[in-house]
Structure formats: structure tokens, C-alpha cells
Image (cartoon, helix red, strand yellow):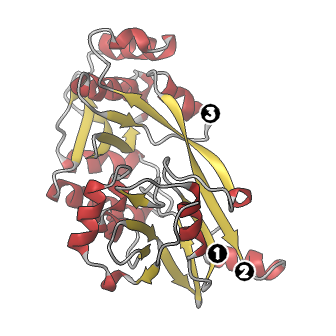
Amino acid sequence: MSKNLNIDFFHRHEIDDERWNRSIDKAFNGNIYAYTWYLDVVSPGWGALATTDYNYLFPLPVKKKYGISYIIQPLLCQQLGLYSSKHISPDLTDQFIESIPSKFRYININLNIHNKTEKYSNHTTRRKTYMLDLLSYNEQTFKNYNQNTKRNIFKAIAHDLTFTPLLNPNEFLKVYRQYGFMVDRKKDIKTIEKLIETLITHNKAIIAGVADKNSQTGAVALFAESHNTLHYLLGAAEPEIKKKGAMFFTMDGVIRNNSGMDKVLDFEGSMIPSIERFFSGFGAKPCIYLNYQQNTLPAGETLVKLKQKLNLI
């Protein structure tokens, strides 16, 4: 059993950014989502659980609405949970979960792939992300694709599509504003614009795209790079160019540009079968992470109304 840690809750203004980010840099399971500057964009006002030495960090994307404090996984942030440069046992993960202040009446958060739990297993569900090791990829890369993926790439080549590894952010936004998925268009596009700007400032952004034979960009993809991992954050395509295999061609271009390097491509997974097939078609393998939920909101009809107000359903 792991030793009991002294764990404190910190509001955003109480967090030392330099110490926090230095610890995330060193964490064996660090990822792009855990940096203070990334969380500031996707979850303004976030808080955290941490030990005073910053050896263990557990960001909490907190929100408050109608007088109710709750924690919910933000968009563009697949995994959070417990981070450290030291070993993380299931018992340590449990200690942090039980240290979440009781004032948070509803919790729905994704842990990272290195977090396991024993005590709270009944409150978790398994989710999948798809990951591709790029180090072992070389000129034989294409052979690892399935037939549907190969067929779509050949289709893109036949239609004279061209891949661009360094797309202008404005070109990305132009396509994404029109064809990208958004829950709240006005709010989400502002978040995306700010996130791209922030990633570029920290030299963490890769923006790729595909253009048609008239040099018109019609498919785009945004990646964030950290801890030897490329995280696929967003992608979109104009319907006609999408039919020509543009998104397959985009992903293939990014894979080829980074093949043979000590990197992993995290497709960010999905529980939607068609998207799972798209990711696995490049030879990516599923990797499990846990979603933790806890609910102490009032039961019955009141709960439904509260969830609707809080945008939880």
C-alpha cells in the first residue's frame, strides 16, 4: 500500500505556474492537456489537487453554475487525472479521488492512461484512445494500413490532392468554421482560436491540410505536440474533397512526416464505430483510459432540470 500523502486543494490563483509546468515537463505520464496555459484556455478557472512539493498533480476542470460547483471534462482535453515523475499506484490515484472536495456535487472526468483505481472502480467506465508508434515506421508504413485506408489514399492521389504539413492558422480556421464539429459554435470557435494561438506561442502546434488540384484548401487537421506525442485535436473537411479521401491523405501525410522518430501519434480515440475504424485503419492500437463519475446532486425530476441547466445532458 502506498504511503498517505498530504493533499491540498488549490484554486487557480494559488498555483505556481513555473513549478507546476516544470513538474508536468518531468512527469513520466505528462501530456499537453496538463499545462497551466492549456488548461487556462479549455477550462478557465480550473483548480487542482496537489502535494506541497508539486510531486503529484491532479488538475480539476471546475465550473460553477446556478450556485452548484461541479467538475466536468472540457472539450479539446481528452485525459487529465494524476501526474507525477514518480510511480503512480492505484492506491495513490484513489487517495486523490477521495480528496476531491465534497462541494463538487457532480464529477465527470477522464483519468490518463497511467491511472488505475481499485476503490472507485464501480464509478469508472473504460474508454479507448488509439495510438500509433511512429518510431518503428519507415518505408513499409503503407503496408500496415488496412485496405479501406489504402483505397482512400489512392483515391486522393488520383484526384491530384496535395498535402501541406505547415498550414497557415487562418486557412485552418476558414475550413473549420464552416465544416468542423462544435457544440456551441460561437463559444467553441473562440476557444479554438485562442488554443491555436497559445499552442503556436509555446511551439506546440502542428497544422496540416490538403488542397485540391486548384490549390484550394479543403481538409485540415490540428495536432498538439508534447512528451514525444502528437495529439490529434481537431479535423474537418469540405464534403466533396472528403469524398476524395482527403482526411485519410491528411493523416497519412502527418504519419509520413514523423515516421522513424521517437514519437507516438495519439488519435484521441472515439467510442463511435466509424471513427474507430478510421483510426485503426492506420494500424493504430486501442489503449484504455478511465472515466470517473460521481453524482451527489438531488435525485428525480430536480436532477434532470439541474443537469439540463448545467449542460450535463
275 shown above or below 294: above
Element type at mark 1:
strand
Residue 313 visible to the viewer: no
Query: Residue 165 at x, y = what percent?
Result: 20, 32
Q: Position of residue 154 (x, y in %)?
A: 37, 11
Q: Distance from label 3 to label 2 (Cα)?
A: 32 Å
Outermost residue toward the right?
300
Q: State which mark lies toward you, 3 or 2.
A: 2
Residue 72 seen from this side: yes
Which image quarter is the C terminus in? bottom right
Query: Which residue is label 1 attached to?
Result: 106
Q: CA distance from mark 1 to mark 3?
A: 28 Å
Task: Residue 303: give x, y in percent of width and height.
Answer: 76, 78
For the residue marked with disc 2, what is the amino acid? Leu
State the residue in front, 125 or 148: 125
Marks 1/2 in contact by CB < 8 Å: the verdict is yes
**Secondary structure under the numbered disc 3 in the rendered image:** helix
Residue that mark 3 sits on: 273
Please tell me which residue is depicted at 47% across the width and 63% down the height of the picture. Answer: 74
Q: Residues within 10 Å of mark 3 (few under 14, many from 20)?
A: few
Who comes first in sequence, dot 3 or dot 2?
A: 3
Q: Amino acid at mark 3?
A: Pro
Earlier sequence position, callout 1 versus callout 3: 1
Q: To which residue does mark 2 refer?
A: 297
Looking at the image, tell me whether mark 1 or mark 2 is earlier in sequence order: 1
Please indicate whether residue 244 sits to the left or right of residue 269 in the image.
left
Asked whether disc 1 touches disc 3, contact meaning CB atoms under 8 Å apart, the reply is: no
